[in-house]
Image (spheres, grey):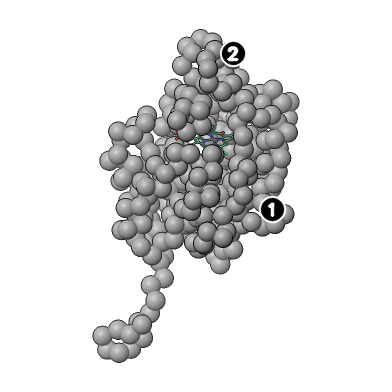
Amino acid sequence: LLGLEGKPRAPFVPRFENYQEVYNHIAKLLEEHNDYDDGSYGPVLLRLAWHASGTYDKLTGTGGSNGATMRFAPEGDHGANAGLKAARDFLEPVKAAFPWITYSDLWILGGVAAIQEMQGPKIPYRAGRSDRDVAFCTPDGRLPDASKDRSHIRAIFGRMGFDDRAMVALSGAHALGRCHTDRSGYDGPWTFSPTTLTNDYFKLLIEEKWAYKKWNGPKQFEDVKTKSLMMLPTDMEIVKDKSFRKYAELYAKDNDAFFKDFSNAVVTLFELGVPFEHPEDQRWVFKSSFD
Ligand code: ZEM
């Protein structure tokens, strides 16, 4: 490319400040569009980042957030991804305002902003994902099935490389958001504050009594006291399995321990399979809108 003087123009290499601008833009949109669901697009943005990342397979090195292949029909239409169009559409004006960012980096930055803006821990970030074409779509069935048991949870998250402790920490994301009958078939939120990240998911799992919900939908649990909260069969495994339960008890008692382990596990999740140029010790920490 030539500039006005006919000299080569230096290519635009975005820096931390540029990504912080994108973060700020997402934070502003989150604040403006507070009429969605329980008052925030935050939960569905986090779910988009998780489903982009959670397809990773450590044996073949396929899947993960590099590629943003959920843009394409085979992967976007997978049952597990139902409803995530809302999150992708939310980020479209951000892509238009900052065309230099890849969809792959943008979706993960959306997840980072969602967690931080919903008062969760800082999620250090590295840029460097590139968008790939439809040929890189992952096969269906790589994301967890909520109707299954502990062996399925361990198989799915083990395939990504996670241990029991990280699996439990990551599950704490279900403090946020809700199930939608027109997406997964399940119904309701896990906590009373679904737009603020807390360790309430673990507190409720351990302290409340849970019973099967009597309805025509898929098998799920409801709290006996208020019947207004829900747990998936996979959520209940977190307190039924001895090894999982140990960590759930720790996180229920100690929000700082939860935040620390959650942040570490999410950073790992969001980077699975990405061939970064930037070293691990040079991750960026974005300022939140309330910092
Ligand atoms: Zn979820 N998740 N998830 N999850 N998830 C839902 C919603 C959300 C499982 C699952 O089947 C479901 C992780 C792990 C697991 C979020 C984040 C993370 C829903 C409801 C289901 C059925 C979807 C709907 O109807 O809209 C299972 C089986 C999991 C593991 C065993 C991990 C890990 C997450 C992030 C780190 C979030 C934020 C939501 C709420 C989305 C929303 O729209 O409110």
Residue 258 picture location, percent across and down: 57, 35
Residue 123 makes an appearance in the image = no
Residue 25 makes an appearance in the image = yes
Q: Which mark is residue 237?
A: none
Q: In this view, does 139 lie above or below 174?
A: below
Q: Earlier in the sequence, mark 2 or mark 1?
A: 1
Q: Could you say which is closer to the camera, residue 100 or residue 233?
A: 233
Residue type, mark 1 in image: Lys
Q: In this view, does 49 lie to the left or right of 289?
A: right
Q: How crowded is mark 2: few (under 14 residues within 10 Å), some or many (20 or more)?
A: some
- The image quarter containing residue 36 is top left
Q: Is residue 51 left or right of residue 86?
A: right
Residue visible at 30% across and 46% down? 28
- The image quarter containing residue 180 is top left
Q: Is residue 135 above or below residue 121?
A: below
Residue 83 picture location, percent across and down: 44, 38
Tell me the SS state at disc 1: loop
Q: Which mark is residue 211?
A: 2
Q: How crowded is mark 1: few (under 14 residues within 10 Å), some or many (20 or more)?
A: some
Q: Is residue 20 left or right of residue 68?
A: left
C-beta proximity under 8 Å, tags 2 and 1: no
Residue visible at 66% across and 42% down? 157
Quadrant containing the N terminus is: bottom left
Quadrant containing the C terminus is: top left
Which residue, as the protein is rendered here, is positioned at the far top? 225
Residue 172 picture location, percent across and down: 56, 33
Q: Which mark is residue 58?
A: 1
Q: Label 2 to label 1, Cα distance in Å?
A: 36 Å
Residue visible at 61% across and 34% down? 145
Residue 61 picture location, percent across and down: 66, 57
Specify whether tag 1 is near ligand 1 (CB below 8 Å). no
Residue type, mark 2 in image: Ala
